[in-house]
Image: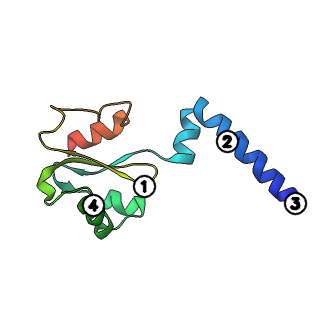
Amino acid sequence: MFAILIVSIYNKLIDKAMPASPWFCRVFEGRPRIVISQGRVHADRLRRQGIGVHELYSKLRQCGIEDLAQVKFAILKADGGISILKHGEHGGEGLYQPPVLPAREMAWAERR
């Protein structure tokens, strides 16, 4: 019973700290990662996130992607979902600018 109380208190403290601290948020929720840029799959990033290529392809098919060449960016969100920006949509950068994606992620994608 005492363990349940401790876990509940710990959970409430973390819930209060996350909105106030970007570090807590990053540690406990993770951050979005670019897994496809310009139609190229970044398998090393998928492995680090624990996602297989076949699972990624399945998610792409569910989003109506028929060919990797259609994808400008695919972003694996912290909750496991995927956001896809196709070529020619949103007139350029669209929604995928900092702070939606960390500046380091955008810089990484531009180097690729």
CA distance for labels 4 and 3: 44 Å
Three-letter code, disc 3 = Met
Q: Earlier in the sequence, mark 3 or mark 1?
A: 3
Disc 3, disc 1: CB below 8 Å? no
CA distance for labels 2 and 1: 20 Å
- Which of labels 1 and 4 is toward the front? 4
CA distance for labels 2 and 4: 34 Å
Three-letter code, disc 2 = Ile
- Specify the quadrant that holds the N terminus: bottom right
**Residue under label 2:** 14
**Residue under label 3:** 1
Find numbered disc 4 in the image and state the secondary structure of the residue it sits on: helix
Q: Earlier in the sequence, mark 2 or mark 3?
A: 3
**Residue under label 4:** 62
Provide residue 30's location: percent of width, then percent of height: 49, 47
Three-letter code, disc 1 = Gly
Judged left or right of residue 7, residue 87 is left
Provide residue 67's location: percent of width, then percent of height: 13, 59
At a point 26% along the width and 57% down the height, the residue shown is 42
Find numbered disc 2 in the image and state the secondary structure of the residue it sits on: helix
- Which of labels 2 and 3 is toward the front? 3
The mark found on residue 80 in the picture is 1
At a point 16% along the width and 48% down the height, the residue shown is 38
Disc 2, disc 1: CB below 8 Å? no
Judged left or right of residue 76, residue 18 is right
- State the residue in front, 46 or 81: 81
At a point 16% along the width and 38% down the height, the residue shown is 89
- Which of labels 2 and 1 is toward the front? 1
Quadrant in which residue 93 is drawn: top left
Find numbered disc 1 in the image and state the secondary structure of the residue it sits on: loop
Q: Earlier in the sequence, mark 2 or mark 4?
A: 2
CA distance for labels 2 and 3: 20 Å
